[in-house]
Image: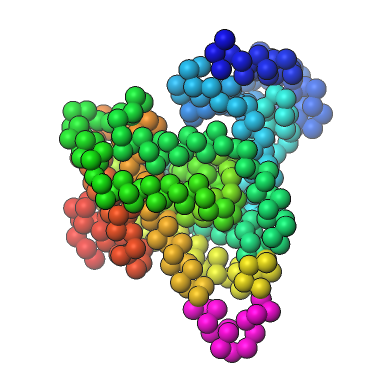
Amino acid sequence: MSLASETRAAGAAGGYHPLDGGTLPDYLAKLENCASILGGNPSEWHVDEVGDGNLNLVFIVRGASGSLVAKQALPYVRLVGESWPLPLKRAFFEHEALIAQIDCVPDLVPAVHHYDDVMALTVMEHLTPHIILRKGLIAGNLYPKLAEQISEFMAQTLFKTSDLHLSAKEKKQRNAVFCDNDALCKITEDLVFTDPYRVAELNRWTSPQLDDTATRFRNDAELKVAVQSLKEAFMGRAEALIHGDLHSGSIMVTETETKVIDPEFAFYGPRGFDVGAVIGNLFLAYFSQPGHAGNGQDRVAYGEWILTQIGEIWDRFQSRFLQLWESQGQGDAYVAGLFEEPDSVAAFAAYRRTYLQDLFHDSLGFAGAKMIRRILGLAHVEDLESIEDPDRRAACETKALALGRTLIVDRKTYESMASVISCARQLQGGDEE
């Protein structure tokens, strides 16, 4: 029996079975709060399976008076199939992360209406008329509140789940809950930090246009050493509860509202991984813009808007993080009572700035790693994949790879996000302003 079959058999023994459009209404009808939200007769509820991700089943259920989203884990990686088994317990970690995030930023994550540990199922708020940020960036939409709200999400969650805010005991207890999410951490360790730099069966890229580039990256000793240092940080630095997969496909938006979804990769890791994921995916969107130009639109102005968001996200994040540290830094790290006399106040203020600069450099490195894996690894992004002309797509990807490499290898030479944006603009071929 395969490991996937064994996992399914174990789940079935405890009552687990995958739901579908026919069985989900009967399940939800037994949950008073969910049935009340949907309203009407369960036989008339409409179910759409909308999961376009790599791992899970996702359903939208619509009733007479409302709608819900039901997300159920499968015992394998959906993108690959049963040959890649995956524990159902990832649904538990997602639920725990959602509850922690709701505690920090209730307005920036979906409400949770029900969780079933046996069924590996979470029923939550249906976000509407929100769309996935990645799709909005491909369409060229503007989101005036994006920078403000995603930076608030990161600052709040990455501060309030850390030793800067929590007692050492509480931080250790929270960390212990997520230590068992090793299977999803292993996916990140392999797909982000290892596979793009070696011959791996599941790697793919725009071929033959990027064949030589892929070979060059596999043979780039300086890059590989730098990437492995990032991997060590990812595996060993339990700084805060990180989302773990905070790309533009895990953010839903309207013009006025931002919501973060899908934290099943959550664990206690380096803060810069979340910040870098957001920044890296926005840079991928930026470099994809020439590939989406047409119909009288060159997308140059929209690309500049994306760069503005990147700069604003970092500026807002670091400002808000420092504000939280100054006002709510009651954790067991950097005990506030030690820094009351004028010299200590000044020294601590200077140290906080250095601390944020180190976080900035971490974020750049992780951003670069996320960019490279989306071009030379397994799971790619629609921003680039939707560019039909392979030559045009490869041209966009080549520029993104160049920035990704420098963000990893040269990350400590950048003093500000403005300097990174200037580098991106030069690679894109625009004029510096």
Residue 140 visible in the snapshot: no
Q: Give the prevailing secondary structure in the magenta stretch.
A: helix
288 vs 360, nearest the viewer: 360
Residue 416 placement, left or right of 174? left
- Residue sitting at x 47%, y 67%: 356
132 vs 409, nearest the viewer: 409
Residue 119 visible in the snapshot: yes
Residue 298 placement, left or right of 163? left
- Expressed as whole percent of the image width and height from the top left, the position of residue 107 reads 64, 51
- Expressed as whole percent of the image width and height from the top left, the position of residue 36 reads 78, 30
- Residue 180 is inside the magenta segment: no
Residue 19 placement, left or right of 133? right
234 vs 106, nearest the viewer: 234
Looking at the rendering, in which quadrant would you find the C terminus?
bottom left
- Residue sitting at x 79%, y 32%: 33
63 vs 365, nearest the viewer: 365
Picture mark count: 0
Span colored in magenta? 336-350
